[in-house]
Image (cartoon, rainbow, N blue to C red):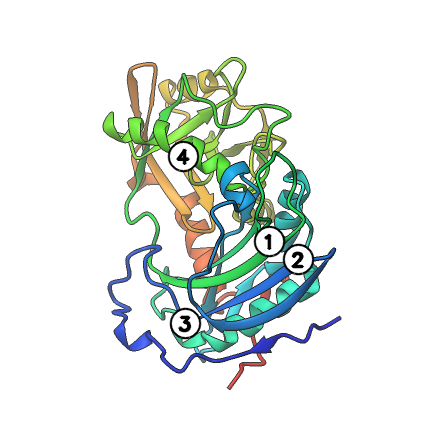
Amino acid sequence: MAANIKITKTKNSKIHTVDFNNIPFGKVFSDHMFVADYIDGEWTNMEIKELAPFSIHPGNLAWHYGQSIFEGMKATAKPDGTPLLLRPEQHIIRLNRSAKRMCMPTFSEEIFVQALKELVGLDKDWIPQEKGSALYIRPLMFAMDEALGVRPSDTYRLVIFTLPVGPYYEKPVSLLAEKKYVRAADGGVGEAKTAGNYAASLLPAKLAKEAGYDQIMWMDAKEFKYIQEVGTMNIFFVVNNTIYTPKAGGTILKGITRDSVITILKDEGYEVVENEISIDFIVEAHNKGELTEIFGTGTAAVIANVFKFGHEGQDYHLNVSDYKISPFLKSYIEDLRAGEKEDKFGWLHEVVAVIA
């Protein structure tokens, strides 16, 4: 069922101010946003309009009690300029899963995809042409009640806005296996893409950078023995040509790129093991020369190679120049997003009804 989304185009596009050859990640915003309000038990006031600040009351429940969830997506374009979305329906499924965990209302999958296509169609000229760059899409839902008291809000706002971006990681990264701080525990909100998870990661990530690493490799909350994920992505290990990744569950975000990578690898004939992975297993594989690749996956990062990890005061290095599987995956996904590779899994959505 299509929604009647009001569209008001900006009269003051900022696109002429952007250097598309030098785009800092997350700091340049395109012209429009989609907004919908949840009032009296239904989503209403659906509109695409000029990107602008909101007026928010100091007593907004989201600021005080954390009812805020989001997604991360990308739009790219075919050589003829037709915008492409990769698996958008999976992102609204995950957003709704986060909403349920955070006691928030779900949003129509069909209307979400419709809003995405109309928004991206309107701002299609903001899609960078260089492969590896994209129009990043940020859906965000947050509480809107103006009242204090620990309870779920009755009103909410869903916003979708976009940003032209270059690569998130421009070079291989280093990881520190965390032995003190915890990202998520069984029964918590680790599987939800909620703002509080990321707020809790800021201090340990800062400390890791001060110690000379790029990011945290999170361990389980009970024994600090089993690997969960990285601060900005899911993680994969290649041991004796078998690919290992932690099993997604209540403490690990179910990444869309992660799922895509697993599907591609299995289709290419690789064995993929989703299970608990102990840091001891990885260290032992490294010492035996059996660990040949470590890489992360995520919408922003796409595929990010890891050149070393630290554990209990010792660093373990890998030769990224010998990596074979992660470069193949990165090329596969980038070619797919550019419309240059067969979409054998039916993942791509073309934005054909471009708004004039």
- Disc 1 marks a residue whose amino acid type is His
Residue position for label 3 = 31
Amino acid carrying label 4: it is Ile
| Residue in view at x 29 percent, y 15 percent | 313
Earlier-in-chain disc, 2 versus 1: 2
CB contact under 8 Å: marks 2 and 1? no
- Number of other residues with Cα within 10 Å of mark 2, as a class: few under 14, some 14 to 19, many 20 or more: many
Marks 3 and 4: in contact by CB < 8 Å?
no
What separation in Å lies between label 1 and label 4 (alpha carbons)?
A: 25 Å
Q: Give the residue displayed 40% in from the left and 76% down from the top.
A: 125
Residue 335, image x and y in percent?
A: 45, 62
Which-is-in-front pick, marks 2 and 3?
A: 2
* Image-quadrant location for residue 45: bottom right
Of marks 2 and 1, the one in the foreground: 2
- From the image, tell me which residue sits under label 2: 38
Name the element at disc 2.
strand
Q: Comparing marks 2 and 4, which lies closer to the viewer?
A: 2
Question: Is tag 2's residue or tag 3's residue first in the polypeptide sequence?
Answer: 3
Asked if residue 332 lies left or right of residue 106, the reply is left
User: Which of the two discs, 1 and 4, labels the residue nearer the N terminus?
Assistant: 1
Element type at marker 1? helix
**Residue annotated with mark 1:** 91
Residue drawn at x 43%, y 68% as measured from the top left: 51
